[in-house]
């Protein structure tokens, strides 16, 4: 197994669509999230007649021996709202013995604005995301037959407030408030015999987050309680996964019987390895790779790196300023592009591969 290679592919899935060119919160395409693999709360899914998914199911085949163990990791983004407010009342509650101000805020302390400039930096109201991992410990595959393993998980609500000060006067100029809603769910894992020394693995992810008055809630409100860009990484020790795209003839029928909902598992890692599968909401082939010519993540797999890079270079100073203030990930894209060496840009232009000498 090549953890670094697998991590790069999994991260590409995790952040696909996180923010799109022109990488500014004010851009229309960034006003509504469209990430793949979004699992909303069950009540919202029911209220929407099932058009919004609340579950995801992976099924795949694995060849085993009595010592084979399987481990599973579920990854997704947990969104949070970032609000920017302009101070309208003193919100500090200073505590003398602390080296910094501790404070509380309420709606009366500030007025929400779309953007606020403080000390030459632009702060904007937008959505951010926190990476979440749910791990199921390794379990013996054969002993887990008809014995479902269920893992409940929860991530609590939180509110964090950042006070913005004017460097020249020391006065409070604004606040950045980050609010995150609580989410909870389950991961269910089971196995059943599918042939001699072969088992079918079933892994389901369910969003069990309560949501009162779901019919009245907007999609944005539901997304704040959703698992976004959800995907699953499965690892087997002393065993081998079977490609569902190109299964051996003896297992073709069993592979066809695998029922994958909202996701599809493919082999990942170095070509020929069979100890890891990535079940992704984005359609992939076995052994997907990040192109070596890519200078870094751009969060938009539907575009060509060279085109996106050239477009970023043509942004105005004001557009770059907004991009820099979107969040750390957008800022890193801009900074990487601004110092991109000419030879790296030329690598994106094109490369000839697999040329045959046959006439």
Image (cartoon, grey):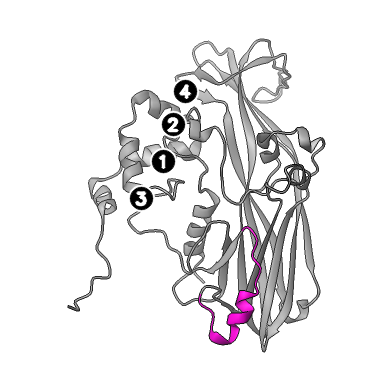
Residue furthest to the left: 359
Marks 1 and 2 in Cβ contact (< 8 Å)? yes
* Residue corresponding to mark 4: 121
The residues bearing labels 1 and 3 have C-alpha atoms spaced at a distance of 10 Å
Whether residue 237 is visible, yes or no, is no
Callout 3: helix, strand or loop?
loop
253 drawn magenta: yes
Residue shown at 64% from the left, 65% from the top = 260
* Residue corresponding to mark 1: 333
Q: Disc number at residue 323?
A: 2
Neighbour class for label 2 at 10 Å: few (<14), some, many (≥20)?
many
| Vertical comparison of 279 with 311: above or below | below
Marks 4 and 1 in Cβ contact (< 8 Å)? no
In the rendered structure, which disc, 4 or 1, sits on the residue that comes first in sequence?
4
| Vertical comparison of 328 with 269: above or below | above
In the rendered structure, which disc, 2 or 4, sits on the residue that comes first in sequence?
4
Callout 1: helix, strand or loop?
helix
Callout 4: helix, strand or loop?
strand
Q: Position of residue 52 (x, y in %)?
A: 68, 47
Residue furthest to the bottom: 196
* Residue corresponding to mark 3: 295
Callout 2: helix, strand or loop?
helix
**In the image, 66: left or right of 349?**
right
In the rendered structure, which disc, 4 or 3, sits on the residue that comes first in sequence?
4
200 drawn magenta: no
Residue 127 found in image quarter: top right
**In the image, 232: left or right of 55?**
left
The residues bearing labels 2 and 4 have C-alpha atoms spaced at a distance of 11 Å
In the image, the segment drawn in magenta is: 246-262
In the rendered structure, which disc, 1 or 3, sits on the residue that comes first in sequence?
3
């Amino acid at each position: 197994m090549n953890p670094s290679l697998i991590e790069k592919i999994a991260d590409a899935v995790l952040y696909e669509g996180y923010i799109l060119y022109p990488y500014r919160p004010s851009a229309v395409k960034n006003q509504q999230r469209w990430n793949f693999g979004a699992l909303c709360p069950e009540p919202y899914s029911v209220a929407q007649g099932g058009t919004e998914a609340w579950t995801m199911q992976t099924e795949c085949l694995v060849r085993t021996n009595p010592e084979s163990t399987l481990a599973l990791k579920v990854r997704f983004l947990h969104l949070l709202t970032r609000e920017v407010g302009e101070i309208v009342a003193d919100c500090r509650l200073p505590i003398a013995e602390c080296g910094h101000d501790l404070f509380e805020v309420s709606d009366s302390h500030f007025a929400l604005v779309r953007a606020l400039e403080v000390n030459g930096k632009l702060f904007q109201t937008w959505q951010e995301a926190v990476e979440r991992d749910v791990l199921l410990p390794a379990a013996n595959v054969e002993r887990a037959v008809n014995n479902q393993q269920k893992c409940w998980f929860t991530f609590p609500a939180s509110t964090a407030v950042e006070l913005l000060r004017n460097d020249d006067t020391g006065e409070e100029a604004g606040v950045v408030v980050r609010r995150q809603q609580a989410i909870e769910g389950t991961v269910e894992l089971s196995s059943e015999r599918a042939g001699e020394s072969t088992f079918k693995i079933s892994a389901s992810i369910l969003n069990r987050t309560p949501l009162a008055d779901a019919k009245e809630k907007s999609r944005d409100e539901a997304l704040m309680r959703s698992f976004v860009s959800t995907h699953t990484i499965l690892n087997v020790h002393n065993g081998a996964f079977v490609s569902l795209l190109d299964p051996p003839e003896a297992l073709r029928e069993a592979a066809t019987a695998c029922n994958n909902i909202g996701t599809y598992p493919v082999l990942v890692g170095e070509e020929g390895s069979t100890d890891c599968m990535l079940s992704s909401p984005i359609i992939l082939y076995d052994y997907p790779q990040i192109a070596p010519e890519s200078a870094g993540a751009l969060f938009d797999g539907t575009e060509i790196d060279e085109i996106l890079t050239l477009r970023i270079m043509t942004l105005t100073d004001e557009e770059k300023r907004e991009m820099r203030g979107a969040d750390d990930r957008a800022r890193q894209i801009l900074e990487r592009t601004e110092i991109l060496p000419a030879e790296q840009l030329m690598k994106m232009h094109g490369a000839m591969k697999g040329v045959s000498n046959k006439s």
